Image (spheres, rainbow, N blue to C red):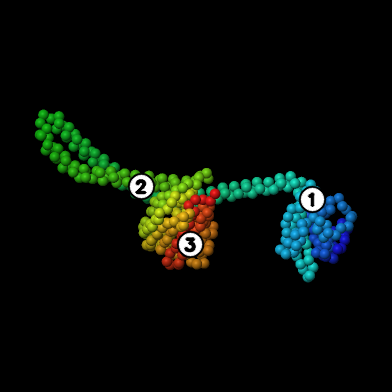
Amino acid sequence: MLAVTYKLFINPLLLPQSATFRSLSEKMLEGLVLFRADGQLVVANAVARESLWPGEDNEAFSVGERLSQILPAEATNQARVKGSWTGSLPAGDRVVIAHLYFSEEDGAGYYLVLFHNIEGQQDYERELQQRHAELRQAYVRLNGTQDKLLQSEKMASIGQLAAGVAHEINNPIGYVHSNLGSLQEYLRSLFSLIEAYERALQAPDPKALIPEIDDIRSRSDIDFISRDLPQLMAESREGIERVTRIVRDLKDFSYSDRSESWKRVDLHAGLESTINIIWNELKYKVTLERNYGDLPLVECLPSELNQVYMNLLLNAGQAIAERGTITVSTGPEGSDHVWIQLEDTGSGIAPDLQQRIFDPFFTTKPVGSGTGLGLSISYGIINKHHGRIDVVSTPGQGSTFRIVLPVRQPR
């Protein structure tokens, strides 16, 4: 082993740009040592000298011998086999983080060691805690950003559906308003008839007013009113319930609360709620078929799953050019999983695009027609539920998206 003094830290024969390299290495905050496999030193900067040989100035040591006293036995072997080794080294009241690298060129092996000094074990633990806190803050910020992105995409979807939802609300409101106009006319006729009956009851000869009563009944078509009035009220009630259901579904769908708890819910209710919201977008060109199986209650975040259903149903509807069918099927998978499947007879997805459809911002729609986030967000939601989402598609024949979810979330 070749012994060197600590006054010689650069071998100009081994490193042609020694002056430049030495100048740069002396400015480093990390310790740096470059030495040959035979122990011959090439470079050691000031931080490394202080880490490896504190207080020793001129005493001669082989670099390999000194490092062998500090590095674990497996460090150099692992570096030779795998190319690198990383570990922490106690050094008195300090902790040294070491990164060891090995390379072999022209038959000569070289080790490069980088040291990061941390004064005191407590300082070391404090730095680890600080790094941990920083990572937690970054995670919280990322999670908050994801929630905002999820809510933004949800509201963007509702924005795209606004005209259809307005139509779905205006249609029942329209005939309820018309029915109220008819009801007003019916009430006027009925009150006229009631007044005629009251006059007859107060008259000395009630039978004398029978012709007048018959005339009012004939002109007002009381017989028709008596048949139409129950139907009119039933239609009006149905319309109000339709509006109430749409508003409730919109409220549930647009619900955003980071503290939303996991619930055991009926997935079919969520499917029907979502279909109710988007039906105006589909009904003019889609025949919807339901093949619902017998499902247990599933532990989930219902509002997020509703967004997945909506994204998939809208995509299926947009893939159908003129007329087509969307089949929504559900069923159990074993005893602890369920599946939801949406199959369409649309244009399908090209094989080279199927691997990219879940990528953020990837879309096959024209510019301005989609954000490219719908399927990406859906994938993230299903992954959050510890499930999976698969797609099988044939161009020109249609696509099938299948979601598999656990009945209970893992603890």
Determine whether, in the image, residue 127 is placed left or right of residue 53. Answer: left
Q: Earlier in the sequence, mark 3 or mark 2?
A: 2
State the residue at coordinates (87%, 61%).
3
For numbered disc 1, what is the local secondary structure? strand
Look at the image and tell me in which quarter the N terminus lies.
Answer: bottom right
389 versus 191 height, above or below: below
Kind of element beneath mark 3: strand
In this rendering, position of residue 55 left or right of residue 362: right
- Tell me the mark number nearer the camera, choosing from 2 and 1: 1
SS type, badge 2? helix
The residue that label 2 is drawn on is 242
Callout 3, which amino acid? Val
Q: Residue furthest front?
A: 335
Q: Are marks 2 and 1 in contact (CB under 8 Å)?
A: no
Q: Position of residue 156 (x, y in %)?
A: 48, 51
Rendering quarter of residue 324:
bottom left
Residue on which the image places disc 1: 91
Q: CA distance from mark 3 to mark 2?
A: 34 Å
The residue located at (71%, 63%) in the rendering is 82
Q: State the image coordinates of residue 28 (x, y, percent, origin top left).
A: 77, 54
* Closer to viewer: mark 1 or mark 3: 1
Where does the image place residue 269, in percent across and percent down from the top left? 41, 50
Residue drawn where x is 51% and y is 57% of the image: 388
